[in-house]
């Protein structure tokens, strides 16, 4: 009879709202307490339309990256500028906010399955499965699911498809951009790898400088720019182009990790 409201993926919005509320309360001190999240550019969020927005970001942990963005986006929509003070902004969260994640990650345990209900678009990776390299065809059903999510709201994606820094941008992201023509918002995060374990659940270190920088929308000619040109734009925008490395050698990742270790509040 339409009494129970659902999103396009069949999730009951009442359950989803309470799941996000509870998760927000439980996770808030991870970004404002044990650590302090520095935010830049959040005023951009309020100016965005309600749907067909794609956020592209570098990736450091499986879950903490996404959870922090849920906090920042909802706080911004409630009028907070570069702040997540007072978690009351999550009482009425944005329910049409989604994130793209690997299906095997989101089905790996009870907690990932719960988080998946909050907004995961779970897809099968074409290049890696259960720790091994594979070469699979893209499932058109996965592409369709992302298109449905963009039509309904906002989508967060990590176009490198890995938490390892300076890996190449997956061209599938650009295919989505050219097909659905969303507004593309770059995000640069830092400090999460130092703060949390790889999954982003366990706190490794406290008093670490975490940061989220939200940048202006990318200017993209959807019809005429090539995939390679858009890939390069994204690489520079999320600061994952090789030119951002100070040393182009086998030690580049080690150097970046050593720099991260020093990024503590003094």
Image (spheres, rainbow, N blue to C red):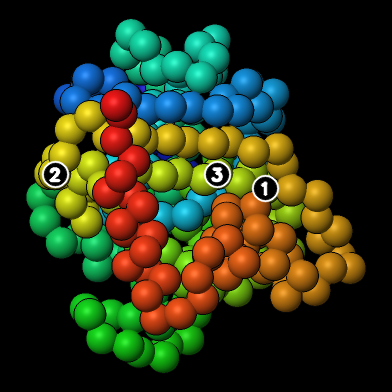
Within 10 Å of disc 3 (Cα), the crowding (few <14, some 14-19, many 20+) is: many
Position of residue 198 relative to residue 214, above or below, is below
Within 10 Å of disc 1 (Cα), the crowding (few <14, some 14-19, many 20+) is: many
**Residue 124 placement (x, y as % from top left):** 37, 72
Judging by the rendered image, the residue that carries numbered circle 3 is 187
In the image, what residue occupies the spot 36% across and 11% down? 85
- Position of 200 with respect to 137 (left or right) is left
Q: Quadrant of residue 103?
A: bottom left
Give the quarter of the figure containing the N terminus. top left
Foreground residue among 164 and 130: 164
* Mark 3 or mark 2, earlier in chain: 3
The kind of secondary structure element at disc 1 is strand
Measure the alpha-carbon separation of dots 3 and 2.
Answer: 23 Å
Asked if labels 2 and 3 touch by Cβ distance under 8 angstroms, the answer is no
The kind of secondary structure element at disc 3 is strand
Foreground residue among 73 and 140: 73
**Residue 191 placement (x, y as % from top left):** 34, 43
- Position of 234 with respect to 181 (left or right) is left
Position of residue 192 relative to residue 244, above or below, is above
In the image, what residue occupies the spot 82% across and 60% down? 222
Q: Quadrant of residue 211?
A: top left
* Mark 1 or mark 2, earlier in chain: 1
Judging by the rendered image, the residue that carries numbered circle 1 is 184
In the image, what residue occupies the spot 32% across and 88% down? 133
Q: Nearer the viewer, mark 3 or mark 2?
A: 2
**Residue 148 placement (x, y as % from top left):** 55, 51
Say the numbered circle drawn on residue 204: 2
């Amino acid at each position: 009879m339409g009494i129970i409201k659902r999103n396009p993926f069949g999730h009951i919005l009442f359950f989803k709202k309470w799941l996000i509320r509870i998760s927000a309360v439980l996770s808030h001190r991870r970004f404002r307490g044990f650590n302090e999240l520095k935010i830049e550019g959040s005023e951009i969020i309020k100016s965005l339309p309600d749907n067909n927005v794609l956020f592209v970001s570098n990736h450091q942990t499986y879950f903490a990256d996404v959870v922090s963005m849920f906090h920042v986006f909802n706080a911004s929509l409630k009028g907070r500028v570069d702040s997540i003070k007072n978690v009351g902004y999550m009482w009425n969260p944005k329910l049409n906010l989604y994130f793209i994640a690997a299906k095997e990650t989101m089905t790996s345990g009870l907690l990932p399955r719960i988080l998946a209900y909050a907004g995961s678009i779970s897809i099968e990776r074409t290049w890696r499965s259960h720790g091994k390299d594979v070469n699979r065809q893209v499932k058109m059903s996965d592409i369709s699911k992302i298109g449905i999510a963009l039509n309904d709201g906002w989508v967060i994606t990590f176009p490198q498809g890995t938490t390892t820094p300076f890996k190449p941008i997956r061209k599938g992201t650009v295919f989505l951009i050219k097909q659905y023509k969303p507004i593309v918002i770059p995000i640069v995060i830092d400090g999460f790898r130092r703060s949390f374990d790889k999954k982003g659940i366990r706190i490794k270190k406290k008093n670490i400088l975490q940061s989220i920088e939200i940048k202006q929308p990318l200017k993209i000619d959807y019809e005429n720019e090539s995939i390679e040109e858009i890939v390069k734009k994204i690489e520079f925008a999320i600061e994952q182009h090789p030119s951002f490395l100070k040393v182009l050698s086998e030690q580049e990742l080690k150097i970046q990790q050593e720099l991260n270790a020093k990024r503590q509040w003094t």
